[in-house]
Amino acid sequence: MNAKSLSLILFISILFILNCHGQLSLQLDQNNYLNNLYIKKVMVTHDDQTVWALTGDGKVYYKKAQEIDFTAYLIISDIIVTDFAGYNFNDMYFTHEAKGLMQIKNGVKKELILSDPAITQIRNIAVVLNDTKSDAAIKGDPLYEDFLAIATDQYLYHVFRGTTNMVKYDIYRQPSYDIKDFTITRTSIRGVEFQGKFSTSGRCEWKSDYSVIKTLGHTTFVSVIPDREGYSRITASLFDFQSKIYTSDEAYDFWGTSEGLYVKKYGRCGTASQLRQVISGKQITDIIEVVKLPGLLEQSFIIAASTEGLYYTPLSVYDEFMQVARPDLVNFIPFPDLNGLKINNIATEYTNFAYESPRMLSMCEKVVWAATPLGLKKVYLEFDGTNYQNKVVPGFIYLGIPVEQTEEKVVFELCGSNNLKIISSVPSNFLGPVLIEWYKDGLKVNGLTGIREGVFNEEGTYRAEMTALCEGVKLRSKDYVIRNKAAPEITFNYPTEISVCETEGIQLNTVLKNGYAYRWFKNDLQIPNAIGNSYFATGDGKYRVEVSNCDQNYVTSSSVTLKITALQKPVIGHNQPNYCEGQSLELTVNNPMNYQVKWYFNGQEISEFEGQLSIKPKLNGNYRATFNNGICAKESDPYAFILVISEKPLVSISKSTTKLLCFGETVTLTAETNANSYKWNTGAVTKSIMVTAPGNYSVEVRNNSGCSNISDPVTVEVNNEIILSVPSETKLCTTAGQELILQADPGYSSYTWNGVKGTSNLLKVNAPGNYQVLIEDEKGCTATGIFKVIKWCKEDEISRALVMTNAFSPNGDGINDFWYVKGLENDPSASVLIFNRLGQIVFEGKGDNWFWDGKFRGKDVSEGTYYYRIKSKAHTNYLKGSVTVIR
């Protein structure tokens, strides 16, 4: 059975027989043990079940497990023992005097000393066994190790097992509570409880200085007990936490006082606590618990010792199925054989089963020892489980979905290799005291004895029988019936091979029935999400279906091989990417397999093109082709080729001017077109170009469809360049009064000299300077020339030309205000010095552009005669003379 695909179902069988409870009864052993000795305390050590007895005068006796009677423990005969506790015969502790504590281990005595000087008394001692600890125990923590608890009038102390150091034990682990004045109120193999005085008082509505402190496993509990309200101090207590529900809300608090025995739910306050006095008017000395049928129908019975006899609960204090605490149903009855006899304390003797489990859960408790003033009394615990024999025990788990179930039977239908797993309700740590046996059709299944789980797949009726070895009670599970289910029906009538076209495929089917599950396979790989009774197969491969009519048990069909005929798809080729009017169009298909070919235009077959591998269409539209091999057809893409024949663009060239161009002039040529791409025969790619050279010009244009057109050429004419012959420079001596005639090239329509237009190519000049001439030919084209006339004279011309006055009147009237020398215009190296009568230079002139204004250092010179000296390249000697200044 595949557990991953099934639901985990927990089915708890509940017995509906009302009066089927197990009952406890007591029977007194008629033998006398330590007869007529006052027995103060009795104890059974856990490790070896040695029974220990303490007399009122401080003597100790013991009886080992296999011995018949008690023997005096002489190793401590020299002290008066007040209390004892221990793990086994060779590991014991004894108190003596007020606060003496002695350890005897393997026959060696050692006195243990309490370090706190404030301690005046050891009240009592007890061994605390950590029965829930595992292999992960925390060393040094009392909650994780066995230890000896020492209750004093001050604090609580402990000694770890295997050590001798006495250490203060903060059992409650609450620094806010300073707990003192300890007394051990329960000394038992199942647990030890302490009563301590808290520094903080007040529990629920009760006022109390004391509370009972309990330990369970690694947890500490503080009971809410009204221990100082209306009765004396607690003498015994029992915190019972045996509920299968494992919640403190379903645990009991029992406590005894001099007035009787009380019970309530643990932790409850007020009316919800269901506080009851279950034994009244009797002083309670001890309380113990006895558990029967652990791991099956666990039942807890309470035994209370008093100064006037022994009391017990003949029925379990818990509901045996729901395991809830019901204080209102707790009922004690007296044990008549010990009625009126003072019972100082009690202890259970038990047998341990040899298997791994917590120690307190492995006991078979059949004897209670009672310490009395008349010796030890041995009381047998009789459990009547007659009503349980062969009854259905609750709490079995099975993996599977039943098709039928009653109070006594669960029916399953299995198919194929599926199986049924049944898991016993017995916890794994109870496989010692409980014997499990499996049966099929009334016969024991070999190899499954003592096994909690059974896995079955054959038809038959199965059950588990569980025997509580301690009580001798046998219980059973329900009957689990397995029926084999018939295989599912498959209809899959197909030939071993089928050929289909790839666009067709084939619908594969099998019978559809309610409750059937389907899964399809291709080439032995499961097809995802194919879980119906039909599947449409479209690819090459081997197909089959598996069908199941019960959980994960599939039966497979025969296989069919599907062969898909796949034709090559026609791919239409064309001889150029775009088509323009006037071009030759050709569409082709490559047909290496020699298929039948058909052509279609706008969805309609073109019959005249059938069988052709190339066609020359003429109309715009959608063209496609198909291949056919006589069985299947394959067409090209729906829009394999859409033919669009585009028009050529229109184009012409416009000119910015139509006149003849003179040399150097330009004309703009523009393409007039509806296209958007241009290419001139000059290489330019702009819409317009500027032209200066003569020639024929044309442009090719292209539109968005890729169609092109070339314009008619246009002619551009350009006149020849006019070149004037102009001398670079002409000399003129104005000193000598010369004149020149400037002559431009002849033969032109007009001549414009310095802005004056005429027909003469000659111009007479008598002064140096630049003279411009503009000529124009008969076509209106012009050219410009510059004649440069410079001033220059020879030396003899210059010497004859020096002219100066011998007087001037610099008075500002505008007449003869300056003195200068004519004829030095072409002699930049000439110099003139003027002196006064004292020989002081009053003026100095250089070159050919100077004059004297009759001033010296910015001030007018006085009237009179002044003298000059002239240096010129025309004369080797200085020219000297005088000039008169007239004011």
Image (tube, grey):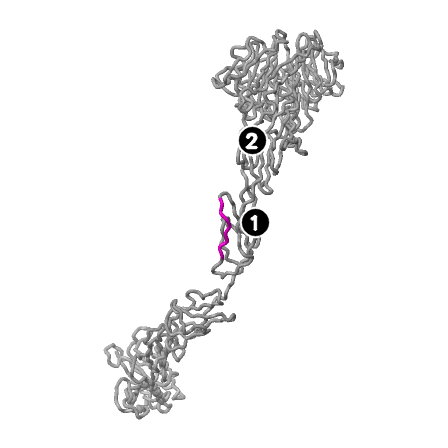
Q: Position of residue 241 (x, y in %)?
A: 57, 22
Using the image, tell me which numbered label, if any, was put on residue 556.
1
User: Magenta residues?
Assistant: 506-513
* Alpha-carbon span between mark 2 and mark 1: 33 Å
Q: Which mark is residue 409?
A: 2
Is 701 in the magenta?
no
Q: Residues within 10 Å of mark 1 (few under 14, many from 20)?
A: some
Above or below residue 527? Residue 333 is above
274 sits to left or right of 876: right
Image location of residue 454, percent across then percent down: 62, 34
Q: Amino acid at mark 1?
A: Thr
* Relative depth, front residue between 863 and 309: 309
Between 298 and 727, the one nearer to me in the picture: 298
How many discs mark residues in the rendered view?
A: 2
Answer left or right for 83 relative to 520: right
Quadrant where the N terminus sits is top right
Q: Position of residue 416 (x, y in %)?
A: 59, 43
The residue drawn where x is 56% and y is 24% is: 243
The reply, left or right, for residue 675 in relation to residue 190 is left
